[in-house]
Image (cartoon, rainbow, N blue to C red):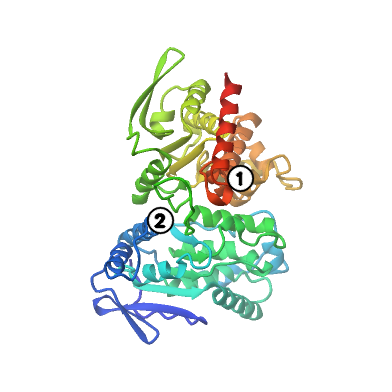
Amino acid sequence: MEGKSTNVLYLPGVITAGIGPGCMRQAGEGIDANPGNRGPLDEYDARVDVGQLQNDDHQRGMVQSLQHLHDELKEYQTPQIVHPDVESLQAASQSSLLGALLRRTTSRRSRTNIPKNLPKGLYLFGDVGSGKTMLMDMFYDTLPCNVTSKTRIHFHNFIQDVHKRLHAMKQQHGTDFDAIPFIGADIAEKGSVLCFDEFQVTDVADAMILRRLLESLMSHGVVLVATSNRHPDDLYKNGIQRDSFIPCINLLKSRLHVLNLDSPTDYRKIPRPPSGVYHFPLDKAAASHANNWFKFLGDFENDPPHIATHRIWGRDVIVPRASGKAVMFEFAELCGRPTSAADYLELMRWYEAFIITEIPGMTHKSRDLARRFITFIDAVYESRAKLVLTTAVPLNELFVSRTEVDDAVREGQKDSPSENGEHLDVDDTMRHLMDDLGINMQALKNSSIFTGDEERFAFARALSRLSEMGSQQWIERGLGLEKDGGKEDMESWQKVRSRWREDML
């Protein structure tokens, strides 16, 4: 990772470090050394050995996630920061910056390209006392030596400084000046790893600028790590114009690994993985993500992983890895051969949790694969089973590539000059997705990206169902968590599953 050795970012309440000889990081007046270039896991083990920390499987899982990012940063090369020209940031049509930010559609000018090699950051959330600060300290203090600049700041101080900069640039260049790309490049130059303490959004002005600001930082190769008391879905809840903030929530969930620090009490001996059930991209952490969930949802002690065979309509269907009520497939094993809804429904009778790995991004050239996968998603949803995925692309690009979306925008907008009434015939998930991708419904209808309304709505429904099945409520239902009713919750979920099986007879 390249960068300068004496970067200083003058923000209130901030610690910014540059790297000197021998991998010594200087932060303020203190000196923090990591001469052995050891990672968070080594540091955690050392603290356990001397009695500073008590070994805890759930907490160790968190530290393992820190270690994965640490390892990625060792090999990560940050792109060169390119500052935009002042002339290019003059707003063309809006009379106020807030008015521009409140628009529902996404302009081409506001869209940024995030480097494909940018490591996914981390979003650690949990209640007071869950260890957020300790884990952030551990990650920040053990960053690899090749990280030549890093910044840690309380989020409130950070966002206040950004507003001051916005105000100053508006005074200097006029109210139409689009200052966010300029400020994003300036902050990115001061730190290639940016750590936020106490990430929260309570003000409408913060909510309206945050998505574009974070995208700008990511486009310059900045890796983000944040702690918070809230899951991203709960940020800015009931806030003014919250609908306009949803794309920022989606950005956080797609570009950062969201980890729940609260250790739930349930009836399983294996600790629940701290991450959500969907993992992107197919990096070094993808395999451990899938294996940890398989171990948690399966029954390795009483039913070690094995190959299983089921007879469906006179044919043998092979399950490559099964344990208890959980199975693991590679995507090619599940959808790479001719399969029908009957095959998937029969699997739902036998199993309650499905871990699907190595899922590629699908384009118009792989529509058969997409249709099979959508049929499988429908079967999982209808049976109320649990789903774990590792994917090569974000969920919003799972069935259409970025290039296809751009082509659809150009093709569809030729015949859709007006955007009045857009998105009225789809659900919120699809509408927010299209806002993220910069495409309106009329353009989607006029393009050839889908063969017809039936395929378009199947696509929308699949994304909506994936969103619901990735929620904490869906994941935890039936696990027997004490906060959800313990054994009563587990028995209630089993009754729902039983009724579904009866309906399928």
Left or right of 7? Residue 90 is right
Classify residue 36 as left or right of residue 184.
left
- Residue 264 located left or right of residue 170: left
In the rendered structure, the answer to whether residue 503 lies left or right of residue 306 reads right
Q: Residue 415 occupies which quadrant of the picture? A: top right
Q: Which residue is mark 2?
A: 58
Mark 1 vs mark 2: which is more N-terminal? 2
Q: Residue furthest right?
A: 420
- Residue highlighted by disc 1: 409
Report how far apart the C-alphas of labels 1 and 2 lie in the structure.
45 Å
Q: Residue at x 59, y 34 (%)?
A: 448
Locate residue 253, reporting x and y percent.
Answer: 52, 54
Please tell me whether residue 29 is drawn above or below residue 310 in the rendered image.
below
Can the viewer see residue 136?
A: yes
Which element type, helix, strand or loop, lies under badge 1?
helix
Image vertical order of residue 270 relative to residue 177, above or below: above
